[in-house]
Image (tube, rainbow, N blue to C red):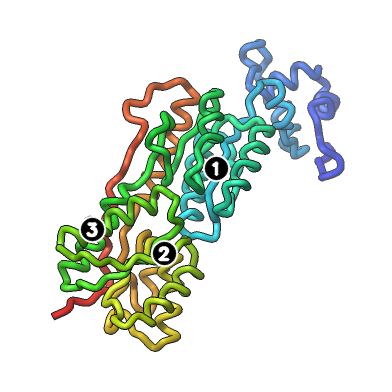
Amino acid sequence: MTKKSTGSNRVNIRDIANVAGLSISTVSRVLNGKADQYRIGKKSQDRVKKIANEMNYVPNQFAANLKSGKSKTIALMVPSLNNPFFAEIASRVNSEIRKYGYVTIIVDSNEDQEIEKKELSQLLSRNIEGLIIVPCGNQKDHINILHEKGIPIVCLDRYFKELKIPYVSTDNYKGAYLATKYLLDLGHRHIACIQGIKESNTNKLRVSGFKYALQEADIKNSILIGDDFTTKNGYVQTKVLLKHEKRPTAVLALSNTIAMGCMKALKETNICVPRDISLITFDDHPYLEFLATPLTCVEQPVKRISKLAVKFIFSILTGKKIKQDQILLMPTMKTRLSVRKLN
């Protein structure tokens, strides 16, 4: 009976060779898919594979990586895995990378640029083959230096237009414009926007879209508050809004985490959505449909964004030319029950 591997007694090629009565080089060639190249007989191949299976042989990937000089690893850095949007991005990117036979190292920068810089340095020491990153701020030199060194990099969601680094994102300007225009078309004139991190380019673009829609409607005074893509920010800023002498009739939250905080604050104050205040959020998520009042939202094409980002990174790795490597995808409005028409 052949022995099986355990955590402390890992089966190696030598063990299989001893049981099979074959040389180590023969077993190695069979297990590495080179049997036909070295004209190893079918009977010997079947014997090696059968014994390896019985012994629960697991290839030493680290040793294989050292030999090939490749880690078969892509790093994904996101600003916060607590944010459902980035959690979904991480899940989809990981699934796509797996299709290429690679593994993903997922890192959370916690919306902190110093953590981002430190984690990037540590990732390089792991010999990653590529990096997909959602930058957490407006500093870009540390990312550009890696790009100039030849590290394959793709920016996802947030990006630096002035750099020659491929990116895939949503047209955030258009998304916020569509949401604001939707509120305006339903008669709302006193609209508040709760924004996220002011320095991030996604936030800047969303704020610009919001302001331009108001400008088109000849509304000169806009309410813009907030400074973080968190539930706490949504909660605190909504409490502030409710103290205004003239309460807004509608709120545009620039992320679904902000919207959750907003809804908590409204519920505590016995203010009903949409009877008392209408609410639109940026980013869709399955749970939005199952809330007591399902939220109208700006939906980003997360699946396509993730797929394109992974396609870009492997195009760079394999030397394939990308026709267009800086892409903005169109968002769509998903209307539910959180907005009412004003007379």
Residue in view at x 36 percent, y 26 percent: 322
Q: Do the residues labelled 1 and 2 touch (CB within 8 Å)?
A: no
Q: What's the amino acid at mark 3?
A: Leu
| Three-letter amino acid code of the residue under disc 2 | Asn
Report, in whole angstroms, how far the alpha carbon at label 3 lies from the one at label 1.
Answer: 30 Å
Depicted 67 relative to depicted 98: above or below: above
For label 1, the crowd category at 10 Å Cα-Cα, with few meaning under 14, some 14 to 19 and many 20 or more, is many
Task: Name, please, the residue furthest toward the left.
Answer: 343
- Specify which label sits upstream in the sequence, 1 or 2: 1
- The extreme top residue here reads 38
| 126 left or right of 138 in image | right
Q: What residue appears at the point 21 percent right and 59 percent down from the top-left corner?
A: 213
For label 3, the SS is helix
Query: Nearer the viewer's eye, disc 3 or disc 1?
Result: 3
Question: Looking at the picture, does residue 245 appear above or below residue 302?
Answer: below
* Point 36% across, 85% down: residue: 271
Residue wearing tag 2: 256
In the image, residue 34 lies at what x, y percent? 64, 17
x 26%, y 58%: residue: 211
According to the picture, the residue beneath numbered tag 3 turns out to be 178
Residue 210 in sight:
yes
Q: Quadrant of residue 4?
A: top right
Locate residue 157 relative to residue 342 in the image: left or right: right
Task: Decide which of tag 3 and tag 1 comes sooner along the chain.
Answer: 1
> Residue 213: which disc?
none
**Residue bearing mark 1:** 76
Label 3 crowd (10 A; few <14 / some 14-19 / many >=20): some
Residue 43 visible to an observer of this rendering: no
The residue type indicated by label 1 comes to Leu
Kindly give the residue lying farthest to the bottom in the view shown: 270
